[in-house]
Image (cartoon, helix red, strand yellow):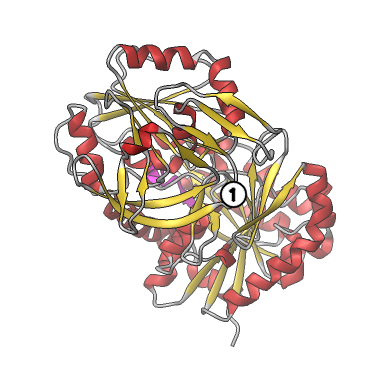
Amino acid sequence: MAARVLMFQGTGSDVGKSLIVAGLCRLLANRGLSVRPFKPQNMSNNAAVTEDGGEIGRAQALQARAARVAPSVDMNPVLLKPQSEVGSQIVVQGRVVGTAKAREYQARKPQLMAYVLDSYAKLREQCDIVLVEGAGSASEVNLRANDIANMGFARAANAPVVLIGDIDRGGVIASLCGTAAVVDPEDGKLIAGFIVNKMRGDPSLFASGMDFIAGRTGWAPIGLVPHFREAHRLPAEDVYGLEASLAPEPGAAGARLRIVVPVLPHIANFDDLDPLRLEPDVELILLRNGAPLPVDADLVILPGSKATIADLAALRGYGWDADIIAHHRRGGRVLGLCGGYQMLGRSVSDPDGIEGPPGSAAGLGLIEVETELAGDKSLIAVNGRTVADDVAVAGYEMHIGRTVGVATQNPLVRLDDGRFDGAISADGRVAGTYLHGFFAGDAQRATWLARLGAPASSLAYEALVEQTLDALAVHLEAHLDVEKLLSLAR
């Protein structure tokens, strides 16, 4: 028998759809239900590798973890990864199928709906209930004709919808009632309830607001959810949530280490930074728009990029290339992750225009390697040990390109499959790796922090994520009418 389904759409982006679906996945899994998350279309450069060798949005991977199941490509059948001049890379059921500008992509949506419904049907055969997350705003009527992410999917799947509004940004009554006013009447019939999210202060002050929305729309009030303070411990879905995720942990005021990250326009897989920002003795500084690199930085990290050559140009445009080279000359350390590793070499070439217009660019020259962006995309989970200190490391590869050069003879990691990864400069102060998730392992992260002079940390990162998902489930259980939600699912 096919599973029940319930879809969560929002009045806008960043209203908390991903977080609420993750919390409900854990809540229902704790009740003994078999749950699968599903997002028809996602746009994010924060992606995860699945066990079936594809890639999906990081938010769906977190939701799968919350549901205590392995992530699969069917949980996010269409993933858009913004690049440079070529628009967005299109990933369908885990595999890259091409690129398209925004208008071109709108024309391709009808063909993509078949893949969306195929993945959805597969998930329904695996579980008791599918929790579907919409994308952006349900009221984008200008994009409704070919929609596959919100009401277009809801109509195709006959899925009941719960609409989420964000009271923290203001205007939540207007945004919810306004959505009811502008959506197509047939779409509106699918909206069965609403949630007001991110309440701060006395919830009784909004009781009349909940009544007003319910009376004006006819939707069932599912709950007024207070702001979940621990949300910053979980990976952000996109780069706009990265700043909000930097809320300091209690006791972090006396941070001893300064780790600096230049935020480039096409930053990708930035959840690599999460374990570091949660360390009590680390101050993680995100540099934006050419802000100068602090002279007392202990470590500079160049994170992943969806458009390495374009981001190299931005790095130089902001003057950060000179800052990083000066930091290195002062004896500072630099680490490059994936695209950041490519930038640290002598050159990056893209002869086939995979990430942008065909061409090449000089790298920072801090490691004796060269990179050519060519060949198939590597999507694989890996385990290994760092060569220099024999400490375990686990992560995943998600990159196009081959990096060669003298420095690869001094690799950073020996993988369990016999390969070597990454490179270390001759002076030992600059290193690069293709491994994402490099700092998620407590032993590997502690080794790096000790090398930089930090005291031993008690942070157990993976356990903290699990504790936070459990706390989120308890939070939603207390503030949502879960029985009403289950009764709406069909």
Residue drawn where x is 56% and y is 33% of the image = 308
Residue 247, compared with residue 478, is above or below; it is: above
Note whether residue 125 is visible.
yes
Q: Quadrant of residue 240?
A: top right
Q: Is-magenta flag for residue 288? A: no
- Give the labeled residue for mark 1: 375
Which quadrant holds the N terminus?
bottom right
**Which residue is the extreme one toward the bottom?**
1
Q: Report the front residue among 207 and 403.
A: 403
Q: Quadrant of residue 467?
A: bottom left
Label 1 neighbour load within 10 Å: few <14, some 14-19, many 20+: few
394 lies left or right of 48: left
Amino acid type shown at disc 1: Gly
271 lies left or right of 256: right
Residue drawn where x is 66% and y is 41% of the image = 354
Q: What secondary structure is marked by label 1?
A: loop
Note whether residue 182 is visible.
no
Q: Report the front residue among 8 and 309.
A: 309
Expressed as whole percent of the image width and height from the top left, the position of residue 64 reads: 46, 63
Expressed as whole percent of the image width and height from the top left, the position of residue 38 reads: 58, 64
Residue 167, compared with residue 24, is above or below; it is: above
Q: Report the front residue among 61 and 310.
A: 310
**Which residue is the extreme one toward the left?**
456
Q: Which residues are magenta?
A: 225-232
64 lies left or right of 432: right
Residue drawn where x is 54% and y is 75% of the image = 129
Expressed as whole percent of the image width and height from the top left, the position of residue 99 reads: 72, 46
Residue drawn where x is 34% and y is 17% of the image = 328
Expressed as whole percent of the image width and height from the top left, the position of residue 123 reads: 57, 74
